[in-house]
């Protein structure tokens, strides 16, 4: 098993600073008005950082809720003994309703027929109605919400706990659509409040919205990118200091000297303009390191930026060190700091023409995660708030939802 390989394993890894996670949660909580709940979003294995360690660190730092995309992700947390409230963003499916009851999960609801099919006996499923205020993805149009809420309240085995929406342009300079979405949701809440039908928890702010305007907080915020130290580039400096939590590191496995004119990599897309020293690094696109970074990205070796040349391979990439003195075993930083130099997720996103969230969340399981700072184990506040026992360690995700 890979866990038994130790130092004999592949010399490439992802390093996660849980102290940075805790720091970021503390800092972001400073932006919240009194009484607003903090949901740490840890979908996609906590954006590639490791769901269970990050969840424990975020809860220890003051997060009260967790958010995931899939019920499978929620069960991983329950099986690890995490008992904090968990909202699943994917719409509730009737065949998974018993899992929500058994493990005390919160469900997102967007369809009356599905909600009726999910009705059952025992512990009620607490649901959050998703409203489409302009994202154009899943959700219910604002005008349809009052009637749907009334119908949901008549379904046995369901309890309406929350209502939420999601911004599509919070991380852009664009203002009109952002404000339009906020006003649509706020107007809906006022309408429900006047009728005495407003659910207890309303939430709309993600990281970008909170950093842009803390007035979007409502009753709870859903913070994903921010807890990992990823700030939307359009925001410039965040109103609180955040620290990147993830680094990608490896060790050089071969050093070679090549003559001028030597062609490098698949497709021979790079021709050495001069005699040069190459360092072979054991990370490739099968690890989630984007092939689009070929001939664009840089890495850090001995505190200096050096370019990746030729195409990123499935398992390896090639660095042109020029005449620099490098050696087998030298540490290579593909993302993170080395000395005074840094390669940020934003740097990689710019080179790959994507966003920092994708850069970190797509990192594969072939890169082991290392946690230099301790992982919190006890979370008494979360356990007390949950009111039920966690899933046993031997519990399995049923095959019908894998």
Image: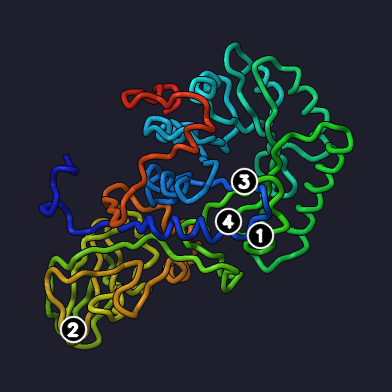
- CA separation in Å, label 1 and label 3: 20 Å
Write down the residue under mark 2: 276
Please provide percent x and percent y for residue 316. Answer: 23, 61
Which label lies toward us, 1 or 3? 3
Q: Which one is earlier in the sequence, the residue at label 4 or at label 3?
A: 4
Q: Which one is earlier in the sequence, the residue at label 1 or at label 2?
A: 1
Which label lies toward us, 2 or 3? 3
- Tag of residue 170: 1
Name the residue: 21% across, 85% down.
322
Residue 207 falls in which quadrant of the image? Answer: bottom right
Write down the residue under mark 3: 37
Q: Which one is earlier in the sequence, the residue at label 1 or at label 3?
A: 3
Specify whether residue 14 is in view.
no
Q: Residues within 10 Å of mark 3 (few under 14, many from 20)?
A: many
Cβ atoms at labels 1 and 3 below 8 Å apart: no
Q: Residue furthest top?
A: 121
Name the residue: 68% across, 31% down.
161
């Amino acid at each position: 098993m890979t866990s038994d390989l130790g130092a004999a394993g592949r010399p490439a890894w992802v390093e996660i600073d849980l102290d940075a996670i805790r720091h970021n949660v503390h800092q972001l909580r400073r932006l919240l008005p009194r009484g607003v709940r903090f949901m740490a979003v840890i979908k996609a294995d906590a954006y590639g950082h490791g769901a269970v360690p990050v969840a424990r660190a975020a809860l220890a730092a003051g997060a009260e809720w967790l958010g995931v995309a899939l019920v499978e992700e929620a069960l991983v947390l329950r099986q690890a003994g995490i008992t904090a409230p968990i909202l699943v963003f994917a719409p509730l499916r009737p065949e998974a309703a018993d899992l929500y009851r058994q493990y005390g999960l919160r469900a997102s609801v967007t369809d009356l027929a599905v909600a009726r099919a999910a009705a059952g006996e025992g512990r009620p499923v607490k649901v959050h109605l998703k409203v489409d205020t302009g994202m154009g993805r899943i959700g219910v149009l604002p005008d349809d919400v009052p009637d749907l809420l009334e119908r949901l309240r008549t379904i046995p085995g369901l309890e309406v706990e929350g209502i939420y929406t999601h911004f599509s342009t919070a991380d852009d300079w664009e203002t009109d659509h952002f404000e339009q979405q906020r006003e649509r949701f706020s107007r809906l809440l006022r309408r429900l409040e006047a009728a005495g039908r407003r659910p207890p928890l309303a939430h709309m702010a993600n990281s970008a919205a909170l950093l842009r305007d803390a007035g979007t907080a409502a009753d709870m915020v859903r913070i994903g990118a921010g807890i990992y130290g990823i700030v939307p580039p359009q925001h410039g400096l965040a109103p609180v200091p955040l620290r990147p939590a993830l680094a990608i590191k490896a060790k050089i496995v071969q050093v070679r000297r090549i003559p001028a004119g030597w062609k490098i990599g698949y497709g021979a897309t790079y021709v050495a303009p001069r005699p040069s020293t190459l360092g072979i690094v054991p990370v490739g696109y099968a690890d989630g390191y984007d092939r689009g970074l070929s001939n664009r990205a840089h890495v850090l070796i001995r505190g200096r930026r050096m370019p990746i040349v030729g195409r990123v391979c499935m398992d390896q990439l090639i660095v042109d060190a020029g005449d620099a003195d490098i050696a087998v075993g030298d540490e290579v930083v593909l993302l993170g700091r080395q000395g005074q130099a840094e390669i940020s997720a934003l740097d990689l996103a710019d080179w790959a023409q994507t966003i920092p969230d994708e850069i970190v969340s797509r990192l594969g399981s072939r890169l082991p995660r290392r946690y230099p700072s301790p992982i919190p184990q006890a979370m008494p506040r979360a356990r007390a708030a949950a009111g039920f026992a966690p899933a046993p360690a031997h519990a399995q995700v049923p095959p019908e939802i894998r």
